[in-house]
């Protein structure tokens, strides 16, 4: 599992470690890892041209010491000092001893234009509120240059704890981060600026509970339900789907499709699209009695394509089993009805739906996704899966937020969310917690989207077809 920790936690761990190490040893560890990553990206260090963008903090010191290492290997290294009077003195002296040069920040466009590599050491993990004007101008120069860009710890202009980007920011090809990932490296919009991320172990001792968790194949494999020899369809779990309408029958079909590929033993469908569902999936158990009388169900999915059927949404929320609330169900559900539930509730909004639920503009959710998912979970006392290029899953009880980035832009297609709802609902019925069901479903759904697309447009049904492939890939 990949984890990310807050700036406060990282700072505390760094202070504890520095108290046990010789002066400057921790920065040298970071610089060694940074220099190695830069050398690998360059391929040939001798004769290459490297430009360091150096701010006033330890971030700039890391860049200077790494630049000195590259200069000793034959690179031509030039440091651009944004705050000459506050530059890390030890790092600057090391660079000069190694043969590096220094230029003022006002005359660097030509220097950066000739560079093979730019190292961004402007602002460290404590940076907030966007770049200052001189750094913002440099970001524009770097954007226009052809050089590869390596960010030190995280790109300048992104906020480490939140993933927010306020104005211009350095866009890196590679970010070399130290000790642990920072939340901004895993969450959009900041993640888009980080490029590939390399973690350098510098010996930090971190607490067991992280700010963010990103599941990997092995973590998901441990969560997925596997039938035992004595299992039957009821022991594996039955998921109920209350979805679709005369206007949106396809939403019901796709939600059932996702549920059938999600590990539960059976799928019950309630709603006006039963003809379409049975025609496509004859194994579905169809009921005409409504959710309360549908028969044995261990979890419900309600809302995809439901139109204005508020009565069915309310009826499902009154049933004492886990419930996944999606699409129209999010709009139709009463907040108090969700808050007073004792069984788990998993809400799966996209940014627009989350904005409507919070009473803010969509841009506010997209710019501060971590804050938005936590607020929604707290307001509704539910587990919230916020869909997007990086999916976030937060429990209302606190703890680490799960982040998933297995998807692809081709998943932004009509009906894809309905497949995800059915899949997550099936995992709920199989006994997973709301946090685990949402996290595992997002992971598998993203993988299936990649397998289905392979760089070309896909439909939601193609994604559902690839769910078994994603499942098998996780186990391999």
Image (cartoon, rainbow, N blue to C red):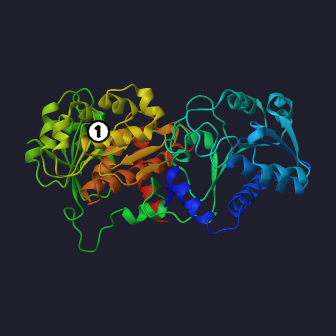
Q: Most extreme residue toward the bottom, as rendered?
A: 229
Query: Picture coordinates of residue 210 (x, y %)?
Result: 45, 57
How far across and how far down the image is residue 229, in percent?
Answer: 27, 74
Examine the rendering and report whether any part of residue 217 can be seen: yes
**Front-most of residues 190 and 427:** 190
Picture coordinates of residue 124, whole percent (x, y): 63, 45
Residue 430 falls in image quadrant? bottom left
| Relative to 311, residue 472 above or below | below
Residue 154 percent location from the top left of the image: 62, 46
Q: Is residue 280 left or right of residue 145?
A: left
Relative placement, left or right, of 142 versus 258 is right
Q: Quadrant of residue 244?
A: top left
Between 138 and 185, the one nearer to me in the picture: 138
Count of labels shown? 1
Which residue bears the numbered disc 1? Answer: 326
As drawn, 26 above or below 340: below
Q: Is residue 388 left or right of residue 101?
A: left
Camera-side residue: 318 or 171? 171
Q: Residue at x 92, y 50 (%)?
A: 99
Is disc 1 placed on a helix, strand or loop?
A: loop
Mark 1 neighbour class, 10 Å CA radius: few under 14, some 14 to 19, many 20 or more: many
Location of residue 337 by image quarter: top left
The answer to whether one can see residue 44 in this image is no
* Residue closer to the observer: 474 or 145: 145
């Amino acid at each position: 599992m990949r984890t990310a920790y807050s700036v406060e936690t990282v700072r505390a761990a760094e202070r504890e470690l520095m108290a046990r190490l010789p002066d400057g040893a921790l920065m040298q560890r970071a610089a060694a890892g940074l220099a190695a990553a830069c050398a690998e990206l360059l391929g040939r260090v001798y004769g290459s041209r490297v430009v360091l963008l150096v701010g006033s903090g330890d971030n700039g010191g890391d860049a200077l010491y790494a630049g000195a290492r590259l200069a000793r290997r034959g690179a031509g290294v030039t440091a651009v000092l944004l705050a000459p009077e506050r530059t890390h003195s030890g790092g600057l002296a090391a660079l000069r001893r190694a043969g590096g040069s220094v230029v003022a920040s006002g005359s660097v466009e030509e220097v950066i234009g000739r560079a093979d590599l730019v190292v961004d050491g402007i602002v460290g993990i404590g940076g907030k509120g966007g770049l200052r004007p001189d750094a913002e101008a440099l970001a524009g120069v770097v954007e226009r240059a052809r050089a590869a860009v390596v960010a030190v710890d995280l790109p300048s202009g992104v906020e480490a704890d939140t993933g927010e980007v306020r104005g211009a920011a350095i866009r890196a090809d590679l970010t070399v981060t130290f000790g642990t990932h920072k939340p901004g490296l895993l969450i959009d919009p900041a993640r888009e600026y980080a490029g590939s991320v390399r973690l350098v172990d510098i010996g930090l001792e971190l607490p067991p509970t992280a700010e963010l968790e990103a599941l990997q194949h092995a973590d998901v494999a441990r969560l997925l339900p596997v039938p035992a020899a004595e299992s039957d369809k009821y022991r594996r779990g039955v998921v109920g789907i209350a979805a679709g309408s005369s206007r949106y029958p396809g939403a019901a079909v796709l939600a059932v499709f996702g549920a059938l590929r999600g590990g539960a033993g059976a799928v019950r469908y309630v709603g006006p699209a039963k003809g379409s569902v049975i025609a496509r999936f004859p194994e579905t158990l169809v009921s005409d009695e409504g959710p309360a009388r549908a028969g044995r169900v261990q979890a419900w999915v309600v809302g995809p394509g439901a139109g204005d059927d508020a009565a069915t949404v309310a009826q499902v929320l009154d049933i004492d089993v886990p419930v996944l609330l999606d699409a129209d169900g999010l709009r139709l559900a009463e907040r108090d009805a969700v808050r007073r539930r004792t069984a788990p509730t998993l809400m799966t909004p996209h940014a627009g739906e989350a904005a409507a639920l919070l009473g803010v503009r969509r841009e506010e959710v997209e710019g501060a996704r971590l804050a938005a998912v936590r607020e929604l979970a707290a307001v509704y006392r539910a587990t919230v899966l916020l869909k997007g290029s990086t999916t976030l899953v937060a429990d209302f009880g606190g703890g680490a937020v799960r982040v998933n980035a297995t998807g692809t832009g081709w998943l932004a297609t009509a009906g894809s969310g309905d497949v995800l709802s059915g899949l997550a609902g099936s995992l709920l019925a199989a006994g997973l917690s709301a946090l685990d069901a949402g996290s595992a479903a997002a992971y598998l759904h993203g993988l299936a989207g990649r397998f289905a697309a392979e760089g070309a447009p896909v439909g939601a049904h193609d994604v559902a077809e690839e769910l078994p492939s994603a499942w098998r890939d996780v186990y391999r």
